[in-house]
Image (cartoon, helix red, strand yellow):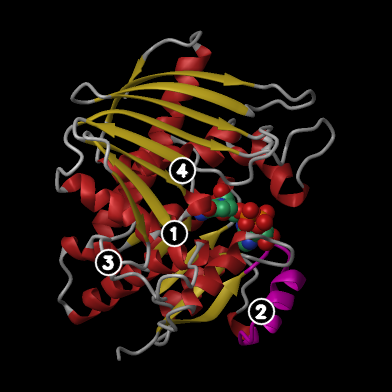
Amino acid sequence: MAKKLLYGMVGGGPGSFIGDAHRRSINLDGQAELVAGCFSRTPEKCLQTGKELGIAKDRCYASFEEMAKAEAARADGIDFVVVVTPNVSHYPVCKAFLEAGINVSCDKPLCLTVEEAEDLVRLTEEKGLLFMVTYTYMGHVTAKHIRQYIREGKLGKVRTVMAEYPQGWLAYEGEWGGKQGEWRCDPEQSGGVNCLGDLGTHVENAVATLTGLKIKRLLAKMDVVVPGRVLDDNDVILVEFEGGATGAYWTSQFAIGHDNDLAVRIYGEDGSIEWNQVDCEKVKMVMRDGTTIERHRGNAGIEPEAAKYGRLPSGHTEGWLEAMGNLYRSFIECIHAKKAGTFTEDLIDFPTVVDGAEGVKFVHACLKSNAAGNVWVDL
Ligand SMILES: NC(=O)c1ccc[n+]([C@@H]2O[C@H](COP(=O)([O-])OP(=O)(O)OC[C@H]3O[C@@H](n4cnc5c(N)ncnc54)[C@H](O)[C@@H]3O)[C@@H](O)[C@H]2O)c1
């Protein structure tokens, strides 16, 4: 077994959400150990989390800039950093670690502007580093199955895609969804976009990953519906892909009754596929003669490239943490291969900085379309 990698974290302090999920999912395979962090902008809170997690005091840093410099200078410095701060700081944090020569795993959306995204792509390539963007849902075994199934042409040419991600947690005036909702609804901290940046980027990435389709142009209607909000909380987007296929996307934060209902329906010449991440253990396929096939994550019939990520026998449910763990499994394997000099691009089985940049370009094309009165915009 290869030696454990060492990693650090920026964000993930007291009361935060996704940082802890990253730590737990990385722990699933026991291939990396958390040894450093700048868990909060408040030094006391950073130390509090560091103490809870058993991190040495001298590796709990007061700022991410200090952390990047200090970790790069250590003989036993971190192999990668996990960036789990609100969107506004993704760019400066990722940039600091790339410049220090450290691999990066950053949560979505990658950053706020297209220029920032392109800069991170350039820096990653220039430095020869690995950069993962954790679009968690694409780690599900069933998602990997669909991607492989379509790649092999088993669905025929894709004709149209319907995709949505409705949530209902911000449905009322005066309710801001706590710490997590507050920064998402604040233009200063979320980059002038709320629902589409938070949920629409997942939809864009899911469709691109599952179908391999590339958006040619789109038309967006981004609405602010709940009184008191200043940023979008309901978005509908029409999409035309290169090659002629079409799509329709919907994201919402006031869809009462929905939690994290990312769902994709793909219609090809030879059949259709239906997948919902809430019911992620199964995928339904209907062939042109009406034959209905339901594949379950742990059963035979799942494409081998996807099945290899399963951890449990069928009937013992896997879920979202495992999906995130699957992304890390490939990311960590790639870092090991880089160290051993055996790395090749085909080893990458996680969303990269290039995929993250596509998400940012998608958001900005939607903003442009909406601002111009809901017109078609080329990507
Ligand atoms: N992949 C997914 O499915 C998924 C799900 C939820 C959130 N996210 C993304 O994860 C990111 C974090 O979201 P969250 O809901 O966990 O937010 P959160 O508000 O719960 O946590 C953010 C944490 O970052 C810390 N922080 C802020 N600025 C910092 C800085 N400059 N240096 C160090 N620490 C800093 C805060 O103190 C807090 O601990 C967002 O980009 C969000 O879009 C992704």
Dot 3 or dot 1, earlier in sequence = 1
Residue at horizontal 68 percent and vertical 67 percent from the top: 13
Residue at horizontal 29 percent and vertical 74 percent from the top: 333
* 94 lies left or right of 17: left
Instruction: Tell us which disc is closer to us: 3 or 2.
Output: 3
Q: Which residue is mark 2?
A: 50
Helix, strand or loop status at disc 2: helix
What amino acid is found at the position of numbered circle 3 in the picture? Answer: Ala
Q: Which residue is mark 3?
A: 300
* 193 lies left or right of 186: left
> Is the C-beta of the residue carrying label 3 under 8 Å from the nearest atom of ligand 1?
no
What amino acid is found at the position of numbered circle 1 in the picture? Answer: Glu
In the rendering, at what x and y percent does residue 240 appear?
30, 21
The label on residue 255 is: none
Helix, strand or loop status at disc 4: helix
Can I make out residue 100 in this image?
no
The magenta segment is 39-57
**Does residue 84 sit above or below 275 in this rendering?**
below
Looking at the image, which residue sits at the far right?
174
